[in-house]
Structure formats: structure tokens, C-alpha cells
Image (tube, helix red, strand yellow):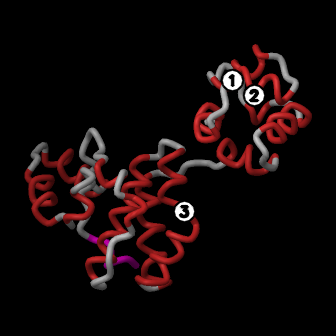
Amino acid sequence: MLREMLKEKNISIYRLAKTSGLPYATVNDLCNEKAQLQKCSAQTVYQIARALDMSMEELLTPYLVKRSSFENFKSSVCHRVKEMGDLAFAADVLERGEIRTYYNRKWYPESLYLLAMLDYISRENSIPLCRDYDDLRKCRLKERLYPAGINALCAASRDDFAREEAVKAAIPEFLRFNIVEAEVRDVI
């Protein structure tokens, strides 16, 4: 993650070491994930944060966020849509920049699921797509993601019929990213 931060800010490992006053070997190990930033001393974190012109909290947050299961994530998103309403949900996702945040963390299923939901809501409400994510709309997960229930049904029946039917019923905005999803409104 530190390497991605450097790339975004167009700073080399060498430059970060010089600017922060830390040994090159330390910074290199952190960038190559041979050492963990969240386990460094407060002084080291402070020096890196200062050199990157960010707070220590901003620097550490990506390292401290725990990733939930994809099924829990999907459920949470669908509940947010139901509770907030389509337009408030879309505005909230865009304001918070969640799609890009997940993508930058390399949490591609979560990022693309949110983008699919945003695009689906846009279609359902006849509003234009947010063009800020056109680059991500070209992405696609390598393997198709099916709902856990469909996977369980196929495993129990030893048959792929349920997967085939799920693909036929899938919402196009999700299927574009190789995510099979048909039930985004029917949450309890």
C-alpha cells in the first residue's frame, strides 16, 4: 500500500527515504512489504506521514481496515441502498469516494460491486452515469463471482444448472464485471 501511495504522489523510495530521514533499507522494506508499517514506531510513522504530507491517521488507515467477507459486503451495500434510498446512496458513495478507495486497496470485487450498483441505480432512475469511473468500467474480475447460495446449491446437487440460471437472471451492470447478482432490492 505504501508503494501505491508513492506512485500516486510520484515519489520514489529513495526520495521518501531522503525526505523522511529514514534509512533507505527501512523504507524499501516497508514499500516491498517485508516490514509492516502498522508495527513501526510512532516516530517512523510520523516521519513517513510528514514526508508524504499527510496525517499519521491517513497513512495508517489502509493498513488497519479489516476486510469482511464479500457476502457481508454485498449485504451491507444492499441494506444501505434500502435504508438511504437510491439517490442518497449514490450521492454518498460518490462523496466518500468508496469505489476508488476499494480499487486502490486492490479490493476489486468490492470496488466493482459498488460501481455496478451505482450504474444500476443510474439506469433505474434515468440519471447519467458518473464518468469519473470510466477507466474502471473497462475492468472485469478474472473469475465469475456467484452468490454463496448458488455455489452451495451447485455443490449439493453436483450440477452447474443453478449457476447457468443465475447468469441468465443477473443484472447486466453487475454481470459486466463478472459478478452474478440478481437480488439487490429484496433484502431483509
Q: Residue at x 28, y 71 (%)?
A: 183
* Residue 25 in picture, x, y percent from top left: 76, 14
Mark 1 neighbour density, 10 Å: few (under 14) some (14–19) many (20 or more): many
Q: How many marks?
A: 3
Quarter of the rendering occupied by the C terminus = bottom left
The amino acid sitting under disc 2 is Leu
Where does label 2 land, which residue?
16
Q: Residue at x 66, y 19 (%)?
A: 34
Helix, strand or loop for disc 3: loop
| Image: 1 above or below 114 | above
Region in magenta: 183-188
Spatial CA distance of label 3 from label 2 is: 26 Å
Question: Residue 20 placed where, x, y %?
Answer: 84, 29
Q: Along the polypeptide, which appears first: circle 3 or circle 1? A: 1
What residue is at 80 percent from the left and 35 percent from the top?
48
User: Compared with residue 15, is residue 105 higher up or lower down, i.e. above or below?
Assistant: below
Q: Amino acid at mark 1?
A: Ile
* Residue carrying label 3: 97
Which residue in the protein does label 1 denote? 13
For the residue marked with disc 3, what is the amino acid?
Answer: Gly
Residue 156 relative to residue 25: left or right: left
